[in-house]
Image (cartoon, coloured by chain):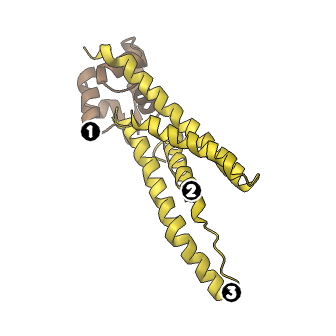
Amino acid sequence: MPYSSEPTRNDNAAWYLAGGWIGALGTMFAIVCEVYFRSPDLALIGKIIALLSILLMMNAKHNDEFLRGLWQAGATTALATAIFWVFIGPFLLGLVDGLMGSPNEPRFPHEWTYLALASGFFVGFNWRRYRGLT
Amino acid sequence: MNNRLKVLRAERDWSQAELAGRLEVSRQAVNAIETGKHDPSLPLAFKIARLFNMPIEEIFDDA
């Protein structure tokens, strides 16, 4: 009978979806701390929350196709963010700097790569969750 | 994709959790299908059709 594992499956799914929210909030907190308060130490709290959320979510990401689809949406967006943050963004900025003759300063700091990827993941995850495939 | 899952479930007086148990997915997945946030895969669509003893086309509509 499938009902014997039903509460566990639903509980795992609930935790999984909660992780999507908690991780998003942790990431936003870290970004605010980095950008507004310029406090990397405080931002570390948000980064740890985001990381723990992802680790928590990994337990249930294969429970069913819906949860798996959310994870894939987040992972795809994180990958796209990574490609943009590491390659495309700096290239485009360098191109503009070269054309404008302005000083070449790093505006995609590598210290923020983790936050960029985490943001991409949770944006993709929650977009898929609340908007579906649209 | 539109579907009649909620109606069919209500006709049998099943909760989302009960339907999820029969389909071996989470309740949250059932909710996502009913609200159109998630389109089921072909195996799951066939499972749903067999559960309700109806053709897939009478449950799901991509118009």
Q: Are marks 3 and 1 in one subunit?
A: no
Residue A61 lies, in percent from the top left, at 38, 37
Residue A50 lies, in percent from the top left, at 55, 42
- Residue named by callout 1: B42
- Residue named by callout 3: A100
Q: Is residue B26 visible?
A: yes
Q: Earlier in the sequence, mark 3 or mark 2?
A: 3
* Residue at horizontal 57 percent and vertical 73 percent from the top: A90
Residue pushed farthest top?
A: B13
A64 relative position to B35: left or right: left
Quadrant assignment for the N terminus of chain A: top left
Chain that the image shows in brown: B
Report the number of numbered marks.
3
| Residue B20 occupies quadrant | top left
Tell me the tag on residue B31: none
User: Could you say which is closer to the camera, residue A51 or residue B25?
Assistant: A51
**Three-letter code for the amino acid on which mark 3 is drawn:** Met
Q: Which-is-in-front pick, marks 3 and 1? A: 3
* Residue at horizontal 55 percent and vertical 48 percent from the top: A123
**Callout 2: residue from which chain?**
A
Residue A2 lies, in percent from the top left, at 27, 17
User: Could you say which is closer to the camera, residue B13 or residue A119?
Assistant: A119
**Three-letter code for the amino acid on which mark 2 is drawn:** Ala
Q: Is residue B9 visible?
A: no
Residue A37 lies, in percent from the top left, at 76, 51
* Residue at horizontal 38 percent and vertical 20 percent from the top: A8
**Three-letter code for the amino acid on which mark 1 is drawn:** Leu
User: Could you say which is closer to the camera, residue B15 or residue A21?
Assistant: A21
Few, some or many residues within 10 Å of mark 1 (<14, 14–19, 20+): few
Q: Colour of chain A?
A: yellow
Image vertical order of residue A19 relative to residue A120, above or below: above
